[in-house]
Image (cartoon, rainbow, N blue to C red):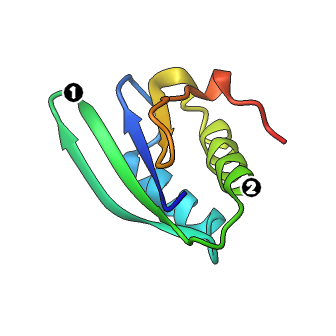
Amino acid sequence: MDFVELVIDGPIAADRDDIEDELNHALLGRGEVTGAGTSERGSHLDIDILATADRQAVLDIIFRVLAALDVGDSVRVRPGDGQTWLRPSEWQPS
């Protein structure tokens, strides 16, 4: 997995920039947010992941950050090695 897409498609209490900052801090040495944008359908973050990073650990970190920011299921995440989008309530941490 070399990237993760994150889409904010519902209301959240946190600012998108705060999510980006928290993800960059938490993923230090494993990946970083490299793109962000907003459209009429919502906001998104593009996260580049180092090829050597453990997939499960990276996703655990991302979902832990989302839980700490209390975004609920207003966010969906797609690991770059799949087509399935996951909501925070659907994530099973290791």
Q: How would you rate the neighbour count of disc 1 (Cα within 10 Å): few for under 14, some for 14-19, many for 20 or more?
A: few
Reply above or below: 17 against 86.
below
The reply to whether residue 13 is visible in this rendering is: no
Q: Is residue 27 left or right of residue 76?
A: right
Residue 52, disc: none
Q: For the residues marked 1 and 2, what is the alpha-carbon distance in whole angstroms?
A: 29 Å
Q: Nearer the viewer, residue 82 or 40?
A: 82
* Quarter of the image that includes the C terminus: top right
Kind of element beneath mark 1: loop
Q: From the image, tell me which residue sits under label 1.
A: 41
Amino acid tagged 2: Ala
Q: Is residue 63 left or right of residue 48?
A: right
Q: From the image, tell me which residue sits under label 2.
A: 57
Identify the residue shown where x is 66% and y is 22%. Answer: 90
Kind of element beneath mark 2: helix
Identify the residue shown where x is 55% and y is 58%. Answer: 23
Residue 73 % position (x, y): 53, 22
Say whether disc 1 or disc 2 marks the residue closer to the N-terminus.
1
Reply above or below: 53 against 73.
below
Residue 68 % position (x, y): 67, 42
